[in-house]
Every structure is written in structure tokens, then in C-alpha cells.
Image (tube, rainbow, N blue to C red):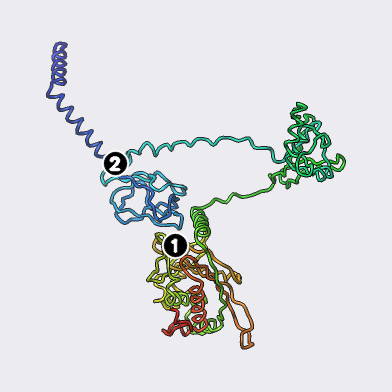
Amino acid sequence: MASAVLNLSRVIRKTAFSPRYTANIAYLLKKNEFHNSSSKYASSEICMPSLSPTMSEGTIVKWYKKEGDVINAGDVLCDVQTDKAVVSFDTEDDGILAKILKPENTTDIKVGALIAIMVEEGDDWQNVEVPAETEAAPSSPAPPTQDKPTPDTPIQPLAGATKIGHDELHGAGIGPSVRKLLEEYGVHVKDVQGAGPQGRITKGDVLKVIKAKNLQRQAPPSGDAPQSPPPSGAPAQPTMIDTSAAGGYVPTLVPEFDGEEYIDIPNTGMRSTIAKRLTLSKTTIPHSYATMDCNVGPVTALRKQLIKDSIKVSVNDFIIKSAALALQRVPQVNSVWQNDEPASMLNVDICVAVATDNGLITPIVQNTPQLAVDEISSTVKDLAERARANKLQLHEFQGGTFTISNLGMFGIGEFSAVINPPQTAILAVGSSRLAIGQNGKPESRMAVTLSYDARVIDDSEASLFLEVFRDIIENPSLLVSGRPASKRQDIL
């Protein structure tokens, strides 16, 4: 029995280490390694896309797919908060969503950063390999700490410092730096001979006395304890020091109001972009302004008549239509600044400013002159609703040739707006008011202010645009008529 077992072990060792058997094992290992390698390289990375021309980072608002879901080309993966709006991000590939690396509400994701991994159908999506650089983000170096002065501790007078009265300061013409030296080194005003204009004491005069007498800067007294801060919840009061008895001036620091409660408001990407664009506009575009008064009584009467016919429109819809027709008749205003030169646009696409919780956005009414007033009304309502719900597509708020900002519904009588680059003009619309007309009767009047780029639009062109706009808005029949709307039509 023992000899049989021994002979069997010899056969096994001989077979296991034979060249043919070893080659088969090597082939199988190589095949398995190739399969693993191909599985690893079959995965595709999903990176944060650039969903607007000015987008540098974004926030993932919501994932519509979860890990393990099958993805077809065109499926929406997630909603991304850009610097403009919330935009849906879809994919062009088929596969399985294997790993989500950036969960919902992850902010400040740079464009091009890895947010998810997708594999082909049939692959092991649960054991997908995640790139090492995404597993642990590099730790940013800690900012250097700086010693901050205690704001609510007043500066104590130096030991032995000479108290300088206000009369002495005024009579000798002593400035703040000179006074500081006198008090820090305990030098009296009478001990310094002024060599400045009209015998005034300068800083150099004080330094000479300090050097001659070999004076040292005096340390603050150690016996005086700093004042305790006010109790929590009570507003901090500035420290008042009575200097009447000493007849001198003791400088104090204004304390911070540490006891006041406050709430940090996070700055969204949209508001950051708005701030950058407004700063760019006001610092690079030479703004000029022109204001025109319009009688909106006829438009109000026409609107009431349309409402009786079950056609609901607003005065703002007439304003948009009037501006569109005025831009057609004064094409110089319908322009943009690009490549360091003006460009006159053929289409009239008017942007309408809409206030949202995240900031101001300007959706576009495409081909505005070709739309009827009721079509403009329905278009603006649809764009405004989807703008407030962060459902606008990129082409619905990127571009445009002219912008209208209407604050009349908020009771603002008149204001001037900032140009929305690369556009060259924006119309600010105020509220209507009752005024006495030329016929002596009260009428409803409205002020509109045109902000325009002086590099592109001349003052005469701006005033012509406003005159055409006024003639159209005061004669609503011109909204459907092809007649010229200005007496200065020879200028066009």
C-alpha cells in the first residue's frame, strides 16, 4: 500500500512539472490576465462636461441613474448646476453605470473631473477598478496662520507715556505718526525743537531726540487687565475711555460685533458668474444712457379689450413686441461686440430678464418680430416657469441680440440697467404713473432708459431707437402695421 502511494506521488510530480503541463498553465494564466486586462480597459470614464461657454465648475443636483442601471445613448444621467442654470447631462454611449464617484449635491466639481465610470454590458460592473487619483483627493496645504489682534481689547497707554493734550497737538501741528513716537518713547512736546515749516515738529525731529537721549520704547503696563467681552447674546459696545482727566488722547480699536448672530449665505456659481459679468461689463464697456417718456394709455386700453376677448396678455408683452419692431427699423442697436469689433445681427432675439432663487437669468424669445403679442406672452410665461424650475436648455439662454429688464411691477419708476455682453444695449422699463398730458388731461406715462455701448451706437442712433419705440407703444396699431413708426425715417 505504501509503495502504491509513493508511485502515485512520483507520477503526479512528474506530470505537474512537465514542460507540456507547465505551458498549458502559463497559457491559461495569460488568457485569464488578458481577460482581466480587457475588462479593465473596457470601462469608460464619465467626466464633468462643459455645459456653457463660461462654465469652469459645476454641482451635481440629481442623478437619474443609479449604479448597475443600463444606459442607452441619449439617456439623461444627471442634472448639473452650471454658472447659468441647471442643465441635463446625457450620454452618447451604451453600457452599465458601474460607479458614481460624485454623489448628489457635490459642489465645485471642476470641468473634466471624473464623476462616474461606465462599463460595457456583460462586464462585471460591481468590481470595476476606480482610478487611484479619484479615490483620495490630494490634500491642500493648510493656509498659513496669522496672529489676529484681539478686536475687543483696547490698546492700553504705554507706561510713562506723556499725555499730549489736544491744544498741544493742534498748536504744534503734530501728525499721527509724530504723536505715536512721542507717546511710545515718553518724549514731551516741549523737549523737541521743530525744524519743519513754520517750526512744526516732524518725525525726524522726534527721532533725533530719541537717538540723542538713547531712549527705549516703553512696554505696556502689566497690571491693567483687558476688559472682558460682553456676555453672549448682547451686542458689543465700543470701548469709551475718559480722557478728560488726563487731558490726553488714547487711541482705541473699534471692536467687532462678535455677539451679533448671522447666517452664512453660500455663493452659488450663477451669482459668481453674474458678479464677474457685471464687473466685466462696467469696466470694459463705455456705458451711455438715454431716457424716453411714453404714453402707455392706448396699450392699456387695448390690453383690456383683448382680455374681454379671452386673450390674456400683459403690458410687458407689448413692450417686447415694440422693442423688436424698433430693432428692425434701427438695426444699429441690434448688434453685438465680438472679436474686438461690432457685428450687426440679422435676427432679432430678445432676452427677457427673469429673477430666480439662484440669481438673474435672461431666457431668449427667438425671432421676436415674427411672433404675435399673444405668442410672445405664452413664450415668456413658459420660459419664465422653466427658468425658475432650472429646466432651461443651453440654447434658450445663451446668445440673444438685445435685453429688456422690467422692474415696473416692483414699483420702480425709473432705473438704468447694465449691458449684458456681448450685446451692446439693454432697455430698462419702469412703472407707469399718472401725469398731465399735452391736452391737459391725465394720462398713464412710463419711463424707459436705454443703456448702450458708445463704441458701437451713437447718441443719434440711440435717440432714434427710443423715438421709434415710443411711437409704436403709443400707437398699438403699428404692432401689426408695416408703416414707418418715426418721422425721422430718412435717417434709417
Label 1: element kind: loop
Q: Is residue 286 above or below residue 316?
A: above
Count neighbours of disc 2 (C-alpha within 10 A) and say few if under 14, some if 14 to 19, many if 20 or more.
some
Image coordinates of residue 112 in percent, x first then y, are 38, 47
* Marks 1 and 2 close (CB-CB < 8 Å): no
Q: Is residue 68 left or right of residue 358?
A: left
In the image, farthest residue toward the left: 20
* Nearest to the observer: residue 130 or residue 394: 394
Reading the image, the residue beneath label 2 is: 124
Reading the image, the residue beneath label 1 is: 422
Image coordinates of residue 264 in percent, x first then y, are 59, 49
* Nearest to the observer: residue 91 or residue 480: 480
Spatial separation of the CA atoms under disc 1 and disc 2: 49 Å
Count neighbours of disc 1 (C-alpha within 10 A) and say few if under 14, some if 14 to 19, many if 20 or more.
some
Label 2: element kind: loop
Q: Is residue 75 above or below residue 210?
A: below
Q: Is residue 432 left or right of residue 104?
A: right
Image coordinates of residue 205 in percent, x first then y, are 75, 36
Q: Is residue 274 left or right of residue 205?
A: left
Image quadrant where one finds the N terminus: top left
Residue type at mark 2 is Asp
In the image, farthest residue toward the top: 3
Task: Please give the name of the residue rendered at 45% of the width and 52% of the height, measured from the top-left corner.
Answer: 61
In the image, farthest residue toward the bottom: 439
Image quadrant where one finds the C terminus: bottom left
Image coordinates of residue 489 in percent, x first then y, are 45, 82
